[in-house]
Image: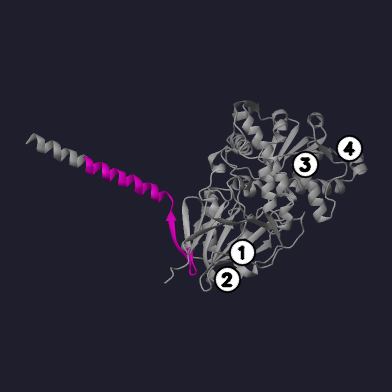
Amino acid sequence: MKKNFLVELSTKQLNVTGSENLLRFKENEKENLLLVDCGMLQEININTFSKENTDFNFDVEGLRAVFITHAHNDHIGKLPFIVKRGYRGVIYLSKETSLFIENVLHDNLKIHREEAKKQNKKPLYDEGDIQKVIDLLEPLDYKKLYKICYNGVNVEFTLYRNNHILGASSIWLKIGRRFEKVSFFFSGDYNTSNELLQKDVHVPKKALNDKNINIVLESTYGATKKSHENNFMDIYSSIIRGVIHENKRILIPVNALHKAQEVLYVIKNIKERLGGYQFYKNYNREFPKVYLDGKLAIKHTYTYAGILKKNFKPSGLIEIYDAGVRNEAILDENSIILATAGMMSNGPVVQYMKKLLTDQNTKIIIVSYCAEGTVGRKLLEKIEYIKNARKAGKKEYEINKIINLFGKELFVNADVEKVTSLSTHARQEDLISLLKNFKKSNISSILLNHGEEIVREKFKKIIEEELDINEEKIHLFDKRNRFIFSKHGLEKIVPIQEKNKKKKKKKKKKKTRKMQWERRKSYKKKI
């Protein structure tokens, strides 16, 4: 008699970045693995040589397929390491996502080589490995049902568009034998509305109809409510204030993929709204020059324009390809500069930060999520400290504005502002709305990932209250636990740390018994 069909789900993710969801199942004594996303960890000063980004907690030989939700580095960055280990299976993704992969991976390789040089190490992969990744890509249509079979186990899956970025997908997966199937819905990084994309989010009909569905739900901003109906309002007002009222140079750190294109779209709208000649007449100066610095951002901008078939770039946009033009942009006091990367730990934005953070005539607008340990997070923490010091009534000379970044002590003299509304992650209301699509009786478990622990804890309570779902069904999904599922849903949770504790206890017991035996021997000798 065959054993019950079980699927194990685990991840290497702890907080927000480094998406890597492993599905493990056995049939006919053969182990089969499926991977949903294969991303780089970008937190706490982790680099591309770090063990967290180079090691896998599974045997690549058993890996049957890889599914990619979207083309951000924290979801695809480890793909070259997988092929380096010998993976030659299929990588499933949306057609639009497939257009970004190559450029993102080549940009990663550039960063990896820079880190190799600094650490006096040999790079761990090369262009040939990236080409192997590209050769394995299998672009798919949205909303279409696909079926594959591994060692007698059927895998059905469908991709659904969400508006996180262009090409982003949620994935429905059903794994099992004829009468024993386990269902999952991976939200991926999720968003419902996006002014730039203006595409409808797909309703995941396959997932909604499944009984005992297990939902892996992102929660980056699960504890945050929407501040505005128009998610561009904050960035509009921030740029307009800086340009018109404060007359400052504006620096906006951006992610190369999607964030750069969104901000360009905002600036284009602002420029058109203010009007070129009219702006000069009213304020006796020209509208600021707009610079885009980051080769990958420039490439993605052309790809976006081609797919969306719309012009979202402000007129007169200056694309920066070399240090000479970069220096011009730094010296240009009447300018709006977009520079990669959004978390400010690497890319051209580093050069701007070194020069402009100390400049009181500069306004830095942070529009991206900044993971723990990144330059962006350190700067935001310093700004928060300064704000609190002012609220406490401290005078300017009493406030410590020195921050250690890039191995230098820099004085925070620029105006630094965080804009939270321009996010490609869904807020609390939209995530709750997604869950409401599911029948309560159909939900076996909700696993919250892609969020800092304190955020996931808060969001868990919100789900309980808003949807009246038993807290036993809602879990924090991170590397501390393995989740075991059957056709009936979630069966058990196995703490991964538990193994290590048991081993330690056993060792102690063995040691104690040995000591007791030695004592007995010595006692007999004395007699």
Q: Name the spot of residue 126 as percent of width and height, x first.
A: 66, 40
- Stretch of the chain drawn in magenta: 485-514
How packed mark 1 is, by other alpha carbons closer than 10 Å (few <14, some 14-19, many 20 or more), is many
Q: Earlier in the sequence, mark 4 or mark 3?
A: 3
Mark 3–mark 2 distance (CA, rounded to whole Å):
50 Å
Q: Earlier in the sequence, mark 2 or mark 1?
A: 1
Left or right: where 431 falls relative to 490: right
Asked whether residue 504 is drawn in magenta, I would say yes
How packed mark 3 is, by other alpha carbons closer than 10 Å (few <14, some 14-19, many 20 or more), is few
Amino acid carrying mark 3 in the image:
Arg
Mark 1–mark 3 distance (CA, rounded to whole Å):
44 Å
How packed mark 4 is, by other alpha carbons closer than 10 Å (few <14, some 14-19, many 20 or more), is some
**Residue carrying label 4:** 286
Mark nearest the camera among 3 and 2 is: 2
CB-based contact (under 8 Å), mark 2 and mark 1: yes
**Residue carrying label 2:** 210
Mark 2–mark 4 distance (CA, rounded to whole Å):
58 Å
Mark nearest the camera among 1 and 3 is: 1
Left or right: where 416 falls relative to 398: right
Q: Earlier in the sequence, mark 2 or mark 4?
A: 2
Total label count?
4
